[in-house]
Amino acid sequence: MNRTPPGRISAIMYIVAALYHFTRFDDPDALRAPMAKLCCDKGIKGTLLVAQEGINGTVAGSRDAIDALLAHIRALPGCADLEHKESTAQNMPFNRMKVRLKREIVTMGQPQVDPRAGTGHYVAPTDWNDLITREDVAVIDTRNDYEVAIGTFDGAIDPKTKSFGEFPDWWQKNKHRFAGKKIAMFCTGGIRCEKSTNYLLGEGVEDVFHLKGGILKYLEEVPEETSTWHGECFVFDGRVSVGHGLKEGPHQLCHACRRPIAPEDVKREEYEAGVQCHQCAGEFSDADRARFRERQKQIKLARARGEEHLGDG
């Protein structure tokens, strides 16, 4: 993550825009270059994923730059009603801009799943608490295990998946637990629930709901004193986590395993900056750790020269 140089106060507040939209792009490759050029010209950084099924990504830039990009995307076929979520960052939370072609804009690996054909019932953040506290409702967190570990809703079930592609298999093994229950699902910004609720509808589940706008919209709109959310929400940018009001959280990222670590975790004996944390201390070889140490050395040298290193963040 880029930091303001010591002694200099940044006057810029970056707009961070998270967006996704399911639509049909017949030639997604033709969309990539113009979008990348616009972002480069406007100083936008982040990642946009483009596939035949639509677009997904999180980017950051000035107010004018983000507005220009949103206008460009909304002019694409089927994207006029694109919705997005905004937050702010004191420092640019991305190191570079990437526009990538993908098979799926969020990978589930289920070709029959198509959110355009139908999804679960959207539940507004202000109505979410009432739904998930009902006895006939089972609440499922569709995010990955490392995301759930730093924050989730009261009573939510953690499938302990390492990737979203594992969710269908988890459901097949556990669906007997939810007989007669209504299913309420949530994720960071809503995109995973577009697919997971469509998947459950295809499996014959009748009453499926999901949090509109995801956790980010809930944390933005629901006051902390009435919230059923505990902890922080992992975000895929340099902020690492956000809390109520979308305020930047205390976590940093382990640059070896890419999992979030809390301030107290850096005091653990297993921790070595840029090399390992307590969660991945046994996952890498000595050769891996030697490579990580060399990368960390180069990052420090680049910082000392006032330069940006691509491995930093």
Image (cartoon, helix red, strand yellow):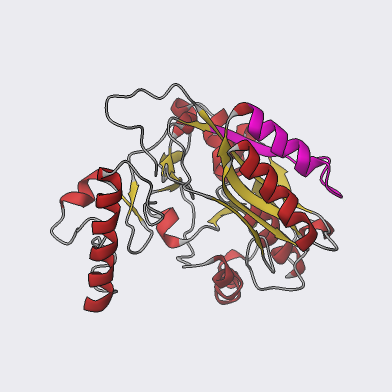
User: In the rendered image, which quarter is residue 170 located in?
Assistant: bottom right
Work out whether residue 69 or residue 56 is closer to the camera in this orientation and state it. 69
Q: Whole-percent x and y of residue 30?
A: 79, 59
The quadrant of the image that shows the N terminus is top left
Residue at the (71%, 66%) spot, across then down: 199
Q: Whole-percent x and y of residue 42?
A: 63, 37
Is residue 85 placed above or below 33 in the rendered structure?
above
Work out whether residue 241 or residue 63 is closer to the camera in this orientation and state it. 63
Residue 286 visible in the picture: yes
User: In the rendered image, which quarter is residue 277 located in?
Assistant: bottom left
Residue at the (20%, 50%) spot, across then down: 266
Work out whether residue 90 or residue 29 is closer to the camera in this orientation and state it. 29
Q: Whole-percent x and y of residue 305?
A: 28, 44
> What range of the chain is rendered magenta?
64-87
Residue 226 horizontal side relative to residue 217, left or right? left
User: In the rendered image, which quarter is residue 114 located in?
Assistant: bottom right
